[in-house]
Amino acid sequence: MKTVVGVLRGGPSNEYEISLMSGASVLNTLDQEKYAARDIFIDRNGNWHLHGVAVPPEKALRGVDVAFNVLHGEYGESGEVQRILESIGMPYTGSDAFSSTLAFNKHTTKEIVEKVGVKVARGVVVEPGADIEATALSLFRTFPHPAIVKPLIGGSSVGMTIADSYHALFDGLQHALSVSPRVLVEEFIKGKEATVGVIEHFRNERLYALMPVEIVPQAEHAFFTYDAKYHGGSTERCPGNFTEKEKKQLEEAAKKVHEVMGARHYSRSDFIISRRGIYFLEINSAAAVGLTGESLLPKAIRAVGSTMPGFVDHVIGLALSGNKR
């Protein structure tokens, strides 16, 4: 009898479209001899759909053996959908509700990661209700520039800008606040950007770090924006242009981050290699990780001689076995 896999995609976030593409990739990757795929679409309002009909989550999941969560952004990676799945006893891929909620908050994540000896950039949180004009002026006078302005929650660099002047900082704060009620202003660390995937219980290792991928923005003082990720605004190199020492440090740091954040099954962490050392940027828990053919994790998986069907099969096995660490 085939295992029924419900692929959750879409969702009420700014990453709706990429989630649809990641979900389609998983659906197309599933071994039809072993799995029966069920496409479970969640619209922008958070309504669940099965065969084009809006239904409650428990009905959409009736008869499903395991849920494969590729709901990027708010709801899918913030702990909300995880709590729904846990309430009905449905096995699912990725981090549990508690760890997902932690990882979704960039500032909390940095505080946790710094405690295990991984460098993080200096940052300040702008709270709801702040006077944006006064805040921008104060930060411009007291904070190192250029600065990165980003929503405190969310992913795919949505709402993120670089500010190198008072006006850019003011505009960046307004833009980020349109995405999230709280904003994180961080020191801009100049250097090579890298991302490292971690897979649990893979190739006889409890935590297996994939080959680091180097991200090369096309413009100076740029960063890995949403457009760069999905519309060709950067070049990815795997293997990247790293020394053996840098490669080892990146892999060890990614495993530390995965461990301390309580991530489950797989994750991808982003870093900057600067003259001052390697700095952690953020973790993408499993639901946040793009799985399209052009996404970073699939490229790293192929670079180590593995395949997406093998990876998807492995992750489903972890979820069904109840594996947590």
Image: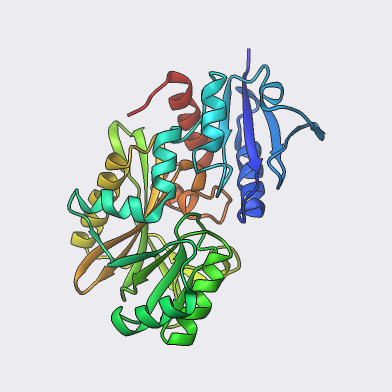
Q: Position of residue 258 (x, y in %)?
A: 32, 43
Q: Which of the pair 7/132 is nearer the observer?
A: 132
Quarter-wise, where is residue 246 in the image? bottom left
Numbered-mark total: 0
Up-down relation of residue 186 to residue 9 (above or below): below
**Residue 192 picture quarter:** bottom left
Side (left or right) of 6 relative to 192: right
Is 147 placed left or right of 64 in the picture?
left
Q: How is the image coloured?
A: rainbow
Name the quarter where the N terminus is drawn. top right
In the figure, 233 relative to 42: above or below?
A: below
Seen from the viewer's position, the closer of residues 232 and 60 is: 60
Q: Quadrant of the C terminus?
A: top left
Residue at 58% x, 52% y is 293
Q: Is residue 90 visible?
A: no
Residue 38: tell me if it is visible: yes
